[in-house]
Image (cartoon, rainbow, N blue to C red):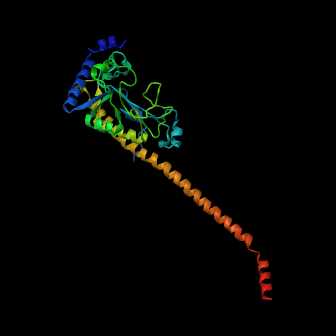
Amino acid sequence: MFIPKLVETISTKASITLIENITKIEYEIQHINKALLIRGASFVPFEIKKFGKKDDTPTLLAGNTLQEPKDLTPEEKQKTSFYKYTFKPYSIAFGNSLFAGAFIDPEACAYSYLTEYVNQSIEQLKQLVGYVLFIDKHDYMRTRISNLFFVAPLCTLAALFAKGEFFHSRSTAAIKIKNNEIGESVKGFWKIKIIDPASIFLINRNPFEHAALFSGFLAKNGRIIQLGDEKDLTPEEKQFIETMQKNQTDAAQYYRAIGILSDWAPKVTLQYKKDFAKKKEAQQSTVEAKIDINKNTPPNDTAETIQSEQKI
């Protein structure tokens, strides 16, 4: 049961520091009239190429709306264009508050992820364990912030006792063409297919463009959460936060470029095939015309005989 664990851990130094930090952030967003989304999760390495640099080291990202294919070998990746990878759309779940889902669905509770290492050493507690997003309420009401988010309409008290896939706030997932008859598999929804003609959770958009928009938003409006007290962090640990934010900015630029390429390359390839087919057809027509001319032209000695007869 999560509640006994909650009671056990909530008085630890790490949990108290976490609650204090989140409380400060909640006061901050109330002052500027924004909403807060909380994500507790391990950060995942992605292949984000740095243009102009020969660096194949995976880049650690706090969040991404794409799930990269895991079944490709390094050799296959070398042979396959990145934009042709079979990516899965990914909807990232967020808590509307630190304890949303705590009573009935602890696996969906941000606190349980943020304090996953609460019984381990203090050095491990200083690691990056999640992030928060500042959501502009006016922008959300107008555009859902470029259709990037679904913010669950639940008050804090109701969310404490909520359960399931749809009480969370979420990032939307994106796919170029949705199948609203049989649905789409979306990473982040547990064993269900999404049929969403209203585009609440799954929208029609180039997935790379969507990933670029999300990474850019996270870089500008996100804040990394650490369990250690900020004044106790080493310069390297503080620098790592800046590195994470830069990684998200790099990812936004990278996915935007790949998105353009993924739209442009198939069109160029198709046009090339059409042009090549026309050129081949023209060449074939020229060859056939030459054959017809040769068929209708008599040999040289026959032509000379005809000319002699005409003179006589």
Quick check: 298 above or below 16? below
Answer with left or right where residue 287 lies relative to residue 263: right
Which residue shows up at 37% across the image and 12% down it?
Answer: 1
Which residue shows up at 35% across the image and 37% down it?
Answer: 147
Residue 190 shows in the view = yes
Query: Looking at this rendering, what residue extends furthest in the left direction?
Result: 31
Closer to us: 185 or 261: 185
Answer with left or right where residue 266 lies relative to residue 16: right
- Residue 307 position in % (x across, y down): 77, 84
Find residue 26 and report its image quarter.
top left
Answer with left or right where residue 148 lies relative to residue 179: left
Residue 50 shows in the view = no
Query: Looking at this rendering, what residue extends furthest in the bottom direction?
Result: 312
- Residue 3 position in % (x across, y down): 33, 12
- Residue 138 position in % (x across, y down): 26, 36
Which residue shows up at 35% across the image and 14% down it?
Answer: 2
Closer to us: 3 or 225: 3
Answer with left or right where residue 78 lies relative to residue 54: right
Find residue 47 and report its image quarter.
top left
Quadrant of the frame with the C terminus: bottom right
Which residue shows up at 56% across the image and 53% down it?
Answer: 273
- Residue 276 position in % (x across, y down): 57, 57
Find residue 118 and report its image quarter.
top left
Q: How many marks?
A: 0
Closer to us: 123 or 228: 228
